[in-house]
Image (spheres, grey):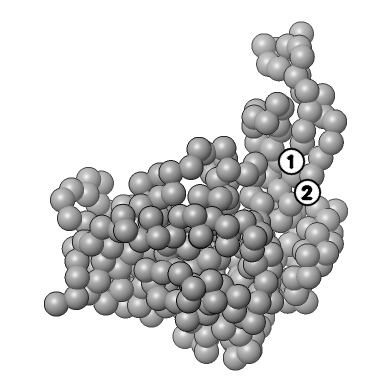
Amino acid sequence: MREILHQIKKFKELKGVVIGDLMLDIYSFGKVDRISPEAPVPVIKIEREEYRAGGAANVASNLKALGAEVSLVGIIGEDENGRILLDLLKSKGIDTSNLLIKKRTRTIVKNRLISKGQQLLRVDHEDGAHPTRTQKDSIIDIVSKLSQKVNFIIIEDYNKGLLSSNLYREIIKNSKAPIFIDPKFEYYSAMKNAFLIKPNFDEFRRATRLHNIRGNIFKHLESFRKRLNAKNLVVTKGEDGMFITSDTLAYHIPSLHRNVYDVTGAGDMVISILALSMSSGLNLIESSILATIAAGIEITKLGAEPITPEELLEEIQRSYERLKREIKVLKEQS
C-alpha cells in the first residue's frame, strides 16, 4: 500500500498528450412545474448553466486535476462554443496550443437538461470533426514531435470523425511514447502495436464478432490482444468490473460496488488512471485496481467531473486491499 501511495505522488511529474474528439458539455439546471399546453411534455425553466470539457477534453481535465501536465490535440469549430471550450481548457492549465480550428464547422456540444438532480433530456449539436488532409498531416506531425517529450499518449475516440485508420497507424508508428487507446467501434486493425487498448465489453464483442461469450473469457481476450499485438488489453464491463490481460496473464478485477448516480465520464476516468499509473511505474494489475477505484468515485458525481487527488487517496486507503483480495485469476503465467 505504501508503494502505491508513493507512486501516485509521481503523477505530478508526468507529461502526457491526449488526442481525440473534443466536446463542450453544457449542463442546464432548472425547475419543472407544469406540462406544456402545446404538447404532452414537461416545461423546464432554466435557472443556471455550467460548462464542462467533454470527450477527449474531459480526459485531459482528469489528468490535469491529478497533477500531470497535458497537451491536447484535436479540432474545434470556429464558433462561440469553440471559444468557450478553449477558454475553459486554458483556465484549467491545459496546453491548447496544438488545437486546430476548422472553419464552417460547429464545435460538438452535448447539452443536458437537468431538474432535481435528474437528466430529463440531452440535446446534441455536431457536424463532426473530420480533419482536412492538411490538418491530418499537422496532427501526425504534432503528435510525433510531442511524443519525444512526454511519458504517454492517450487516443480518445468518440467516433465523431477525427480519428481514421491512417491517423491511428501513423500516430502509433511515429510515437516515441507508449500509446493508450480508448476506442469506439471501428479501426481496430489500425491499432496494432499499441501499448494498451481499453474497449468496453460491448465494443469488445462487436470487434471480435462474438455475440455470446461463454465460459472462460481468457481465450477471447488473449486472441484479440495477440491479433493486435497490443502489450496490454483492458475490457471494462460496468458494475461487473473489468478484464485485463498482458502476455499470458489474465484477471478479472471486481467493481467498487458504489451507488450509481451517473455513469458519464467513467470510461474517460479509467483510461486516465491507467495511463498515469502505468507511466508512474505501477503494473497492469495495480493500475487496473486504481482505475476501478477512480471510476467508482466518478459514477457518484453528476456528469463528467474530474476527481481530486484527495478523493482518490482516501478511497484507495479504504478499498485497495479489499479489491486486491477479490481479484479472480483467469489465467496465470505457465
- Which x, y percent locates residue 187? 42, 65
Q: Residue at x 57, y 83 (%)?
A: 151
Residue 139: image location, x then y, percent? 64, 78
Spot occupied by residue 164 in the image (x, y as percentages of width and height): 51, 68
Image point (66%, 52%), residue name: 305
| Residue receiving disc 1 | 27
> Is residue 114 shown to the viewer in this render?
yes
Image quarter hosting the C terminus: bottom left
Q: Are marks 2 and 1 in contact (CB under 8 Å)?
A: yes
Q: Is residue 75 left or right of residue 325?
A: right
Q: Residue at x 71, y 56 (%)?
A: 53
The residues bearing labels 2 and 1 have C-alpha atoms spaced at a distance of 6 Å
- Residue topped by disc 2: 51
Q: Which residue occupies the foreground of this view, 321 or 288?
A: 321
Q: Residue at x 65, y 36 (%)?
A: 122
Three-letter code, disc 2 = Tyr
- Which of the 4 quarters of the picture holds residue 92? bottom right
